[in-house]
């Protein structure tokens, strides 16, 4: 038994048929048949190439094919279900056609025509993909918002409707996600409060950003109200972000109080040192002076042993005076009481005078003290007295810790003579890497036994680095045990 042949479609104007075949939209003309119960079924009368490709049938041989097997799929079942309604009314359905290269979405309009139904479908795949992506991003954003550990976030659209609400602090702020999400500010809050919030939200939608702090439930929150922009830069909504900053503020306050206490203690220390230095210097200078007189032994009454004792008193007194002077210098720097007097300085002359002053320390001939200066050398804008004090400390240290070899003061400059650095290099005992940071701390030396073997207060490098910072310079170190050391004063000023 052969299937009944499909009736021929009504004649179409050639121009209209040409338009349908060339259209980028899908077009189908369906014939309708009713069975004994009056249930309609549909057969293809005409397909244009776009519709034929989506249905997976050749356009030229599609006439007469039943439509139901072609549409009974998950993405197009809704369209198939609406076709009986389209015999009397215009209906619109979004249908998904699954293809090898991915899904294609059509917005299909079905409307009645003589003897059947006409279908016209426009590709809306990009809109569906964008909507799916937007929904995915919204879900991700909602997940982040609901898991915000110390605050909450509220996102609203241009109609002042809350779209995303979440965060651990919602309950602490007296808010509930279920009571806000999907509702407008007018529906979510009492009239007086909603009026105030609406005014704030409108300012955010106008591009304004506002920050403030609010206290709720004994906790301090930093509140940010800001506009939300889309990829094109248009304002599409607003955001309220409330972050719990209670613990952070407490830590800041604790740090501030600790800093103030440390500054007060440091000021008290500096004041005590300044006062005590005067009280100690006066009797100490007397001890040094009288012991110096006794060392001359003009009456010849002191024997060798007594003179040795007097010499020790004088030497220890001078050492103690040096310690007091160093501590006083350090306290002045820390208290910001040491003034800097800048002027052009001839480094050739300053280095030469410094080496002449320390030349007596090399009289035994085991250490050679020298300088390396470029032929062209511009004056350096600095405080000559304080830079000389730094050089005396560095060269004195180098001589102390160099049993034999060479100590060199080197000025590094550009070809034009612009000073870049001053280096003090020695061939002495060197410093272990793990001790190189510690030696710049007060009363620290390279090794625990260094002070006993070589002497010193442990304040020279601390004062030198502090003076360099005061001058706008940087004091650095390169060293290795047994290979000597290089202390480098970088003269580039800090901004």
Image (cartoon, rainbow, N blue to C red):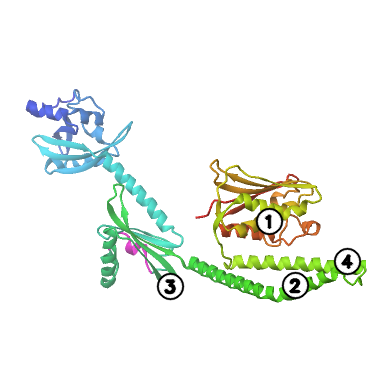
Q: Nearer the viewer, residue 82 or 262?
A: 262
- Quick check: is 441 in the magenta stretch? no
- Rendered residue at 57%/67% (across/down): 336
Q: Which mark is residue 285?
A: 2
Q: Mark 2 packing: few (<14 Cα in 10 Å), some, or many (20+)? A: some
Mark with earlier residue (3, 1): 3
Which residue is under mark 4? 308
Quick check: 107 left or right of 140?
left
Q: Mark 1 packing: few (<14 Cα in 10 Å), some, or many (20+)? A: some
Q: Which residues are magenta?
A: 174-184
Figure quadrant of the N terminus: top left
Mark with earlier residue (2, 1): 2
Q: Do the residues under discs 3 and 1 have CB atoms within 8 angstroms? A: no
Which residue is under mark 3? 217
Which residue is under mark 1? 392
In the rendered image, residue 318, in percent from the top left (x then y), is placed at: 76, 66
């Amino acid at each position: 038994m052969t299937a009944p042949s499909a009736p021929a479609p009504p004649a179409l104007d050639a121009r209209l048929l040409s338009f349908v075949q060339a259209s980028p939209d899908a077009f189908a003309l369906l014939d309708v048949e009713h069975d004994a119960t009056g249930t309609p079924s549909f057969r293809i009368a005409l397909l244009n190439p776009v519709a034929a490709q989506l249905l997976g049938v050749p356009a030229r041989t599609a006439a007469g094919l039943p439509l139901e097997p072609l549409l009974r799929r998950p993405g197009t079942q809704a369209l198939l279900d609406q076709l009986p309604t389209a015999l009397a009314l215009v209906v619109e359905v979004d249908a998904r056609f699954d293809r090898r290269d991915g899904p294609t979405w059509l917005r299909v309009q079905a409307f009645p025509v003589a003897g059947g139904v006409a279908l016209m479908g426009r590709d809306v795949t990009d809109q569906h993909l964008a909507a799916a992506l937007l929904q995915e991003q919204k879900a991700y954003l909602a997940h982040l918002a609901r898991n915000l550990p110390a605050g909450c976030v509220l996102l609203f659209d241009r109609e002042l409707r809350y779209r995303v609400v979440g965060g651990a602090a919602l309950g602490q702020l007296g808010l509930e996600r279920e009571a806000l999400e999907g509702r407008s500010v007018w529906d979510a809050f009492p009239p007086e409060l909603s009026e105030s919030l609406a005014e704030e939200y409108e300012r955010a939608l106008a591009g304004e950003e506002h920050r403030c702090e609010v206290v709720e439930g004994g906790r301090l929150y930093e509140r940010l109200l800001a506009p939300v922009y889309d990829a094109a830069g248009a304002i599409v909504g607003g955001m309220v972000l409330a972050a719990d900053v209670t613990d952070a503020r407490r830590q800041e306050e604790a740090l501030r109080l600790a800093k103030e206490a440390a500054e007060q203690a440091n000021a008290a220390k500096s004041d005590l040192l300044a006062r005590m230095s005067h009280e100690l210097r006066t009797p100490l200078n007397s001890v040094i002076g009288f012991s110096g007189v006794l060392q001359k032994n003009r009456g010849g009454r002191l024997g060798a042993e007594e003179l040795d004792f007097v010499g020790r008193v004088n030497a220890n007194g001078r050492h103690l005076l040096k310690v007091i002077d160093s501590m006083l210098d350090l306290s002045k720097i820390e208290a910001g009481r040491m003034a800097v007097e800048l002027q052009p300085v001839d480094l050739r002359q300053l280095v030469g005078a410094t080496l002449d002053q320390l030349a007596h320390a090399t009289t035994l001939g085991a250490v050679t003290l020298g300088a390396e200066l470029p032929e062209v050398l511009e004056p350096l804008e600095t405080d000559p007295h304080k830079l000389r004090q730094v050089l005396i400390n560095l060269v004195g240290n180098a001589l102390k810790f160099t049993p034999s070899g060479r100590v060199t003061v080197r000025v590094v400059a550009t070809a034009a003579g612009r000073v870049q650095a001053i280096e003090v290099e020695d061939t002495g005992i060197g410093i272990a890497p793990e001790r190189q940071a510690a030696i710049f701390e007060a009363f620290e030396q390279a090794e625990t036994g260094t002070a006993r073997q070589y002497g010193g207060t442990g304040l020279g490098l601390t004062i030198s680095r502090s003076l360099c910072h005061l001058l706008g310079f940087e004091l650095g170190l390169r060293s290795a045990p047994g290979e000597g050391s290089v202390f480098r004063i970088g003269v580039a000023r800090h901004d």
